[in-house]
């Protein structure tokens, strides 16, 4: 039993070092790519990217205190920022694993919901002009993710922290422009909803890595046009930004 426990501890340490190395390499490659883009822009060279990519680079804030799975990182950030509630923006993307991991880490400390701003889920405005959206409460039952049987109504002030599901593994195989357009659509929908609140909100997601250039560009543009010009990154591909109120 002692030998087994020792071997297991060694394996866990090796995996931890592997995760950290992959994390640092991702950031190094991302920094190199942006340096290259900046150098090309300064020299007046034509950039081989889609026309919708403006390549505006926000300030990047690297958070080494958060590691390592992106969903775990975002749950930790949500807890630290103490919003009224956390919402997973489902959209076109699969979000089951993301929702389960968020529910596990939050463990009831913050209300967790899932919502989709497409179609009939947005129910117009109240007397003050604020949008209302249908959302399902999420939780855990004996370690398994469960969703409430009936949706409730949420306003912007009921949320404060939105995790977008579109990003990461579900974008594999998509072109950079498809990644970009899908995420931009989600960002614009949620920004329209959240700006009705009295407090500034945090928009977050996964997939901020060199292998997902469309996501990097969509997040970068959103930070400059809709946020405070800064993107925080941690845990390999997790990202978050504060939207302007």
Image (cartoon, rainbow, N blue to C red):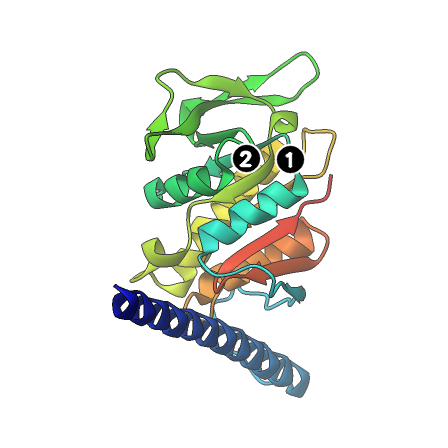
As displayed, is residue 83 above or below residue 5? above
Question: Of residues 54 and 14, which is closer to you in this image?
Answer: 14
As displayed, is residue 30 above or below residue 120? below
Q: Residues within 10 Å of mark 2 (few under 14, many from 20)?
A: many
Furthest residue in direction front, as rendered? 2
As displayed, is residue 103 above or below residue 157? below
Residue 52 seen in the figure: no
Residue at disc 2, secondary structure: strand
Furthest residue in direction top, as rendered? 127
Quarter of the rendering occupied by the C terminus = top right
Question: Of residues 7 and 175, which is closer to you in this image?
Answer: 7
Question: Of residues 235 and 181, which is closer to you in this image?
Answer: 235
Q: Position of residue 36 (x, y in %)?
A: 57, 83
Marks 1 and 2 sit apart, C-alpha to C-alpha, by 7 Å
Tell me the tag on residue 83: 1
As displayed, is residue 30 above or below residue 188? below
Q: Position of residue 186 (x, y in %)?
A: 49, 43
Residue 24 seen in the figure: yes
Q: Residues within 10 Å of mark 1 (few under 14, many from 20)?
A: some
- Residue at screen point 56% across, 59% down: 66
Q: Position of residue 196 (x, y in %)?
A: 67, 29
Question: Of residues 140 and 40, which is closer to you in this image?
Answer: 140
- So how many labels did they put on this image? 2
Q: Are marks 1 and 2 in contact (CB under 8 Å)?
A: yes
Quarter of the rendering occupied by the N terminus = bottom left
- Residue at screen point 52% across, 45% down: 75
Tell me the tag on residue 145: none
Tell me the tag on residue 86: 2
User: In screen coordinates, is 41 left or right of 14?
Assistant: right
Residue at disc 1, secondary structure: loop
Q: Position of residue 176 (x, y in %)?
A: 41, 64
Where residue 45 sits, quadrant-wise, is bottom right
């Amino acid at each position: 039993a002692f030998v087994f426990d020792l071997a297991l501890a060694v394996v866990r340490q090796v995996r931890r070092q592997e995760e950290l190395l992959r994390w640092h390499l991702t950031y190094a490659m991302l920094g190199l790519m942006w340096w290259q883009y900046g150098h090309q822009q300064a020299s007046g060279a034509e950039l081989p990217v889609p026309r919708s990519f403006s390549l505006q680079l926000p300030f990047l804030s690297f958070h080494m205190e958060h590691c390592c799975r992106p969903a775990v990182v975002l749950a930790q950030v949500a807890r630290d920022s103490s919003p009224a509630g956390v919402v997973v923006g489902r959209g076109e993307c699969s979000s089951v694993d993301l929702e389960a991991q968020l529910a596990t880490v939050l463990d009831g400390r913050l209300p967790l919901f899932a919502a989709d701003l497409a179609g009939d889920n947005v129910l117009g405005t109240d007397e003050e002009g604020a949008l209302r959206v249908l959302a399902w409460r999420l939780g855990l039952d004996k370690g398994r993710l469960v969703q409430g049987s009936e949706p409730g109504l949420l306003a912007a002030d009921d949320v404060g922290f939105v995790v977008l599901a579109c990003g990461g593994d579900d974008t594999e195989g998509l072109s950079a422009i498809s990644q970009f357009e899908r995420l931009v659509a989600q960002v614009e929908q949620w920004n329209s909803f959240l700006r009705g609140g009295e407090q500034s909100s945090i928009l977050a997601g996964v997939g901020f890595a060199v292998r997902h250039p469309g996501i990097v560009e969509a997040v970068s543009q959103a930070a400059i046009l809709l946020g405070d010009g800064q993107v925080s990154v941690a845990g390999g591909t997790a990202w978050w930004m504060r939207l302007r109120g």
